[in-house]
Image: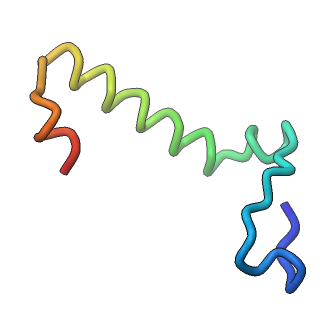
Amino acid sequence: MQMGHQYLGRANWNISIRDVLNPSVLGLLGSNAVLIIWALIERWPLGLVNK
């Protein structure tokens, strides 16, 4: 993803597969998936998950 003055204030939706395979992105997606699965198994109320 490019960062520069031309993208200030605008969302850059040009996402490549290289961006998705970044270890930081994979870690974030994985941790979110684990939390969602855990919440479903434990039947957490939506208000608890939303905070």
Q: Residue furthest bottom?
A: 5
- Please identify the quadrant where the N terminus is shown: bottom right
Q: Report whether 15 appears left or right of 29.
A: right
- Residue 10 location, quadrant: bottom right
Count of numbered badges drawn on the protein: 0
Q: Is residue 10 above or below residue 32?
A: below
Q: Nearer the viewer, residue 49 or 30?
A: 49
Q: Is residue 32 above or below residue 51?
A: above
Q: Residue furthest front?
A: 10
Q: Is residue 40 above or below residue 13?
A: above
Q: Report whether 5 appears left or right of 33.
A: right
Q: Report whether 45 appears left or right of 33.
A: left
Residue 46: x, y in percent? Answer: 16, 32
Q: Report whether 6 appears left or right of 30.
A: right
Q: Is residue 44 above or below residue 22?
A: above
Q: Residue shown at 12%/40% (left/top)? A: 47
Residue 29: x, y in percent? Answer: 53, 37
Residue 23: x, y in percent? Answer: 66, 45
Describe the colour scheme in one phrase.
rainbow
Q: Residue shown at 87%/67% (left/top)? A: 2
Q: Residue shown at 25%/23% (left/top)? A: 38
Q: Nearer the viewer, residue 1 or 6?
A: 6
